[in-house]
Image: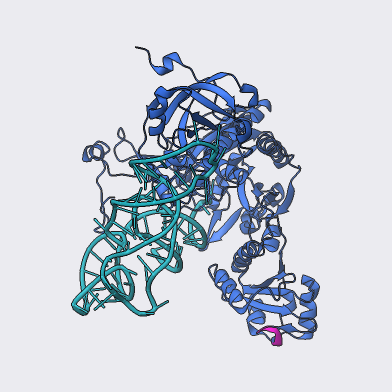
Amino acid sequence: MTTFLEEHGRTHVCGELRAEHIGETVTLMGWVGKHRDLGRLTFVDLRDRSGITQLRFDPHYAEDIHDVADSLRSEWCIAVVGEVVSRGANKNPDMPTGDVEVLPQKLEVFSEADVPPFVIRDETEAHEDLRLKHRYLDLRRKPLQEALLTRSKVNALTRNFLIDNGFAEFETPVLNRSTPEGARDYLVPSRIHPGQFYALPQSPQIFKQLLMISGFDRYFQIVKCFRDEDLRADRQPEFTQIDIEMSFVTPEDVIETCEGLIAAIFEGVHDLDVEAPFERLSYDQAMLRFGVDNPDMRFGLEITDISDAVADSEFRVFSGTVARGDVVRGIRVAGEADGFSRNDLDKLEESVKVYGAKGLAWVKVGDDDWKGPIANFLGDAEREAIEAKMGIEPGDLLLFVAASEEVACASLGNLRKDLAAKLDLIDESEFRFCWITDFPMFEEIDGDIHPMHHPFTSPHAEDMDLLGTDPLAVRAQAYDLVLNGHEIGGGSIRIHRQDVQAKIFEMLGMSDEEANDKFGFLLDALQYGTPPHGGIAFGMDRLVMILTGADSIRQVIAFPKTTQASDLMASAPSDVDADQLEELHLRLALKDDEDGE
RNA sequence: GGGGUAGUAGUUCAGAUUGGUUAGAACGCCGGCCUGUCACGCCGGAGGUCGCGGGUUCGAGUCCCGUCUACCCCGCCA
């Protein structure tokens, strides 16, 4: 006996049939969407990833399959053989295949389906946790199918562009040694080496540099990376980078290549001409004007420093802050003096307190006077000075934070985003790129110096002398690509001189012994004729998220994890057998309140 | 580690302010009718550990304490 599939191959997909196919006999395979039973006449929407075709079961045509047709239920996987016919006067202009329907003469049920836990349709109301538990069903929905197909397209466009531009793709180890800097590592115990561990890569950074030393010139890899840190809407513990490295290049060369790649991706996905070169902003400028190093440039609401204007203010909160060496900065919200109630302003104040601000001072600019709790403390001279800096008009709302530079930036930077959302200032169809350049080489955390990017980043040539005297003033040859307020890529020119690399390790508080233990292979390799090189890594998930208009990278990852880093479908992580632990030379040391689940 | 929001039929929610008879609706599901539907329509029906544990009370979906899970944010993310 032959099976249905042996007798009938799929001739078309469900989104394909048009008026021109009328009269053809076709074989379609897919899933039952809606079935509408009108008594003797039954309509079934047959769905696959290409779209939907309406099947019409009419006993005049095939009496013998009508009972089976009536028994069809949602999400059954079936096949039909039938004739494509016109819908005549009953065309459905809302669907691409709406001119036609298929009259099945044969019906094969491959698999029946349980009633799904949520209805499979484009717009679902089901909560995300339920959908994650049955991800294979959620992935039947069109928005997720489109997102993953876009992701596949980005993969292909990336490979094509880079291969065409002389890049070669290499794989690097997933099982690697743990290195001290950066994020927390995911560790893998070694069975063969008792007590020792591999680490999963946070990025293939050192390996790609070693490939440059080997002479491969132009490397790329689309690669999974792992960081054991807390999750966010745009952060997963495993994520995908488009990893790129080039030899004999300046930052300009890397940037130019990236702009070409991005343009190719946007053209391929959205048929959109991306304007290059992209806007550039130094890190200092970005922090001053936007408060963050990933500014959303689709709207204004820039931040203004008014410290000088209020240094001698009667308003002690302002003058005292400036006297301490901290800053007073503000945002002018044009024409919104009447747009915010006292209650609204209280809410804005709560939102800046999250970032450490003590409060949010506000002024409503009237036609001939300023109003608000602090207005009386601001004299004419101060008002004029503030006006000169912020360009004030009657009807404006002014918002101020007095705090350390760090807190002022963070609070106003995020207030700026909140305001834009509230005032609906963001054009969701716009893609606005910006390079952030000249990052500081180091940042100080609790008195210790840490690399802002990573310890292989090269300082600016002209700042090299500052390494010994004023390390916090040293600028790095590092650049981030920001799109609509998301960092979608970051890279740098790397250190190619062994003595400079050793010096950086030393500055980071690493002894020679420690540096040799952890990075000896890199320091050795740098001794053998290292080309100047640099590169970048793009966050694929974030890029696809923005390309598809998703608001979380979970929507563009086939099987993502929850904010507790769990896979609700596979129930990972999980306990393991005692035998497995034994083999790996591991013994659990759980505290009383940890039961290992 | 911290802050916020949510958890009640299969699903999405209402019910909680003011503790009190039998916890409702819509969608979905099941059955019946229906030959042009495409959010099909009409009639009928089934379906509940009110997240979990404890407490207060004559009585708890409702009040109190604890806890779990999901989401958003801070910290963290070279």
State whether residue A241 appears in this view. no
The image position of residue A266, as x and y in percent, is 68, 38
Figure colour scheme: by chain
Magenta segment: A372-376
Q: Name the residue furthest top.
A: A1
The image position of residue B64, as x and y in percent, is 31, 75
Q: Residue at x 40, y 33 (%)?
A: A70
Quadrant of the drawing holding the N terminus of chain A: top left
Color of chain B here?
Answer: cyan
Question: Image height check: is A119 above or below B73?
Answer: above
* Magenta-drawn stretch contains A274: no
Question: Image height check: is A456 above or below A281?
Answer: above
Q: Is residue A365 left or right of residue A178?
A: right
Q: Is residue A174 left or right of residue A469?
A: left
Color of chain A here?
Answer: blue
Instruction: Judge by depth and name the residue closer to the eye, A524 or A304.
Output: A304
Q: Is residue A350 left or right of residue B25?
A: right
**Number of numbered discs:** 0
* Magenta-drawn stretch contains A375: yes
Q: Residue at x 71, y 69 (%)?
A: A333
Quadrant assignment, res A192: top left
